[in-house]
Image (tube, rainbow, N blue to C red):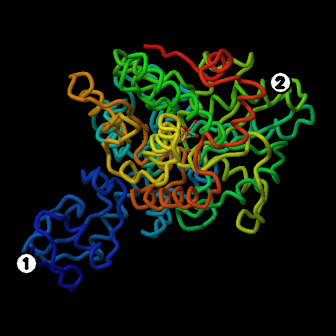
Amino acid sequence: LVTLKIDNQEVQIEKGKTILDAANQIGIKIPTLCYLKDLNAIGACRVCLVEVEGARTLNASCVTPASEGMVVHTNTPRVQRARRLNLELLLGDHNYNCPACVRNLNCELQDAAQSLGIREIRFERHPSKHGQDTSTPALVRDPEKCILCRRCVSVCDKIQTVEAIVPLERGMKTVIGPAFHDSMADSVCIQCGQCVLVCPTGALHEKENIDEVWEALGDPDKHVIVQTAPAIRVAISEEFGSEPGKVSTGKLVAALKRLGFDKVFDTDFTADLTIMEEGTEFLTRLKEGGTLPLLTSCSPGWINFIETFYPELLDNLSTCKSPQQMFGALAKTYYAEKAGIDPADIVSVSIMPCVAKKFEAQRPEMRDSGYQDVDYVLTTRELARLIKRSGISFDQLADEEYDDPLGISTGAGLIFGASGGVMEAALRTVYEIVTGETLENIDFTAVRGLIGVKEASVPVGDLEVKIAVANGLSNARFLMEKIKKGEADYHFVEIMGCPGGCIGGGGQPIPTTMEIREKRIAGIYEGDSAMSIRKSHENPAVQTLYQEFLGKPLGEKSHHLLHTHYTP
Ligand code: HC1
């Protein structure tokens, strides 16, 4: 431990920690912008400057180690002047058209300007000469709002090992973007949107589809239906001031009905269906000696990743479409038939915690209904904007229920939203199919939680099924390398592209920190425990779907509507 003094308070802290850590420990708030705990400590923005007695210059507290006997002042006039000057310089390079910005009122630059009392910006504006990059269906990159904090660069490199965006050029000309100034669409970006979650400003955000949905809702000739992903219900209420992890399923449904959707359905229904298809695919591969380990295929950022970085392992991928896309294909076939509606008049909207789902919905192979299966994808954040725009008081809504039949689901479908959930849901079903016995303890806790790579061995009849679960793409890469080198003997592997799984997706409320992810995960399992049915194969609406329409898992209709192929 070292002992130092900050603003006349003595503090003891582990050697190697910074002045910022020490100040946080005793509740002294130093403003930061480029700093991101455990990920980005580069001292670039100079907003966290402090004065250390005896030092020649001011020091960036996020990178200056705390040392024995140090005396630090965080609020002297010199410190204030320097912080304000640095912030003004950043603002001079920034497009501060705040009222029209997607991050207005949830922007760290705005907050810093407020907390430092900036009332005028004395410098002529020099916003970036690089225009917006709108080349992908998922993301918008706006260099005019970028403050060069490099948080996005760190998350893309260290957490996702994608390295799609890097600092280009030097000094005043520096810009963050794909190498060689390529567009995002031409880069290796897998569109997971983790960069959006860490961006302090509006420099990275989802491509909005709110207006298109608004138009559809106002069109009397359209039948507008919506599906909600598992992870939305434990996050949406954060946008309205609630604690993270609060399960708000009933209010979510009520809000969508108030917005005018003709039917409110649940992606959890097709998550259950995915288990029927993927579980059968797994057992078939086991029996017939197919390619193993089977890799799950529901996370679109992960699909983009394996297509880009590990095309040699594409045969391992499950051919199952994601639940979002299974829903889309059924909405314009099974549901249209059942409801007697021309599929050409159906507008299928999904609410997702993910920006890569926008990309997935637009893939050319996702048109097996004869139409684009999912027309529009809104993130959790976009849905919140839509609700606010409509003047709906989310917290005052009375709970409502999903519609039949595509709104009926089980706890197994719900846990898809957290890392390990797909595997746990599959095990609940595969165990009972293989053994013919009732699974008494259905909680496979070994696969739950935020640990990057989880491994387990589960007895299923005569077989020890070896499983692995990874969340975040650096962890996926670790497993893929192991599989490629022949060092893994797994049968079944779940991969989710975002840390924590979909609860930590790139479309979720900002902030999304590790602590917030934990709380959302707790909400998911709380919701699962409260469900009356917790195994996918017991979903009565899924059983009816097979009887009335699909026939059997992996049957001809399933093959046509619910399965896909991949492009190296
Ligand atoms: Fe997900 Fe999925 S769980 S991919 O994380 O398999 O986005 O929530 O909707 O499709 O069901 C996301 C979440 C989501 C799909 C399901």
Q: Quadrant of the N terminus?
A: bottom left
Question: Is any part of residue 94 visible from this angle?
Answer: yes
437 vs 7, left or right, is right
Mark 2 Cα within 10 Å, few/some/many (few <14, many 20+)? many
Residue 437 to residue 18: above or below: above
Report how far apart the C-alphas of labels 2 and 1 lie in the structure.
73 Å
The residue labelled by disc 2 is 343
Q: Name the amino acid type tagged 1.
A: Gly
Q: Nearer the viewer, residue 143 or 381?
A: 381
Mark 1 Cα within 10 Å, few/some/many (few <14, many 20+)? few
Q: Quadrant of residue 562?
A: top right
Ligand 1 falls in quadrant: top right
- Label 1 residue SS: loop
Q: Name the amino acid type tagged 2.
A: Pro
83 vs 533, left or right, is left
Residue 283 to residue 237: above or below: above
Residue at (70% x, 36% y) in the render: 543
Residue 556 percent across, percent down from the top left: 66, 15
The residue labelled by disc 1 is 69
Q: Nearer the viewer, residue 117 or 471?
A: 471
Q: Earlier in the sequence, mark 2 or mark 1?
A: 1
20 vs 133, left or right, is left
